[in-house]
Amino acid sequence: MDTSRDLLVERLVQLIDRWGLATPAIAFLEANKPISFVGSQALLMLQPIADFFVPRELTTDLAALLADRSQLERLIANLETMQSRE
């Protein structure tokens, strides 16, 4: 397991939970799972523009997360677990 990806997944789960968007996030991720790789490539393509708003490391890590189906599944599972605790 990659520690930076683990931290990114945990950070995303906490952020989504804090905003109260767990249910919409789960639905969005599940619906777009088949095209997540295309989304990761689009994010990399738009990275020069995104660098004005967020650090390059974040966009690279997000693109890697979207490209890796197992990490995406883990994000969804962690969101569902967080949601079931409430």
Image (cartoon, helix red, strand yellow):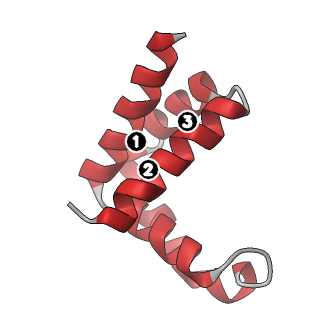
Q: The residue tagged with tag 2: helix, strand or loop?
A: helix
Q: Which residue in the structure is indicated by mark 2?
A: 9
* Residue at image coords 79%, 84%: 52
Looking at the image, which is closer to me, 66 or 10?
10
Q: Quadrant of residue 20?
A: top right
| Cβ–Cβ under 8 Å for marks 2 and 1 | yes
Please state the horizontal and vertical placement of residue 64, each as a whole percent of the image.
39, 69
Amino acid at pointer 2: Val
* Residue at image coords 49%, 77%: 60
Asked if one can make out residue 67 in the rendered structure from this viewpoint, the answer is no
Disc number for residue 28: 3
The CA span between labels 2 and 3 is 16 Å
Please state the horizontal and vertical placement of residue 43, each as a whole percent of the image.
57, 72
Query: In the picture provided, is 38 more to the left or to the right than 86?
Result: left
The CA span between labels 2 and 1 is 6 Å
Looking at the image, which is closer to me, 55 or 50?
55
Q: Quadrant of residue 2?
A: bottom left
Q: Quadrant of residue 21?
A: top right
Please state the horizontal and vertical placement of residue 7, each as a whole percent of the image.
43, 56
Q: Residues within 10 Å of mark 3 (few under 14, many from 20)?
A: few
Q: Residues within 10 Å of mark 1 (few under 14, many from 20)?
A: many
* Residue at image coords 47%, 35%: 31
The CA span between labels 3 and 1 is 12 Å
| Cβ–Cβ under 8 Å for marks 2 and 3 | no
Amino acid at pointer 3: Phe
Amino acid at pointer 1: Leu
Identity of the residue furthest to the right in this view? 52
Q: Is residue 40 above or below residue 24?
A: below
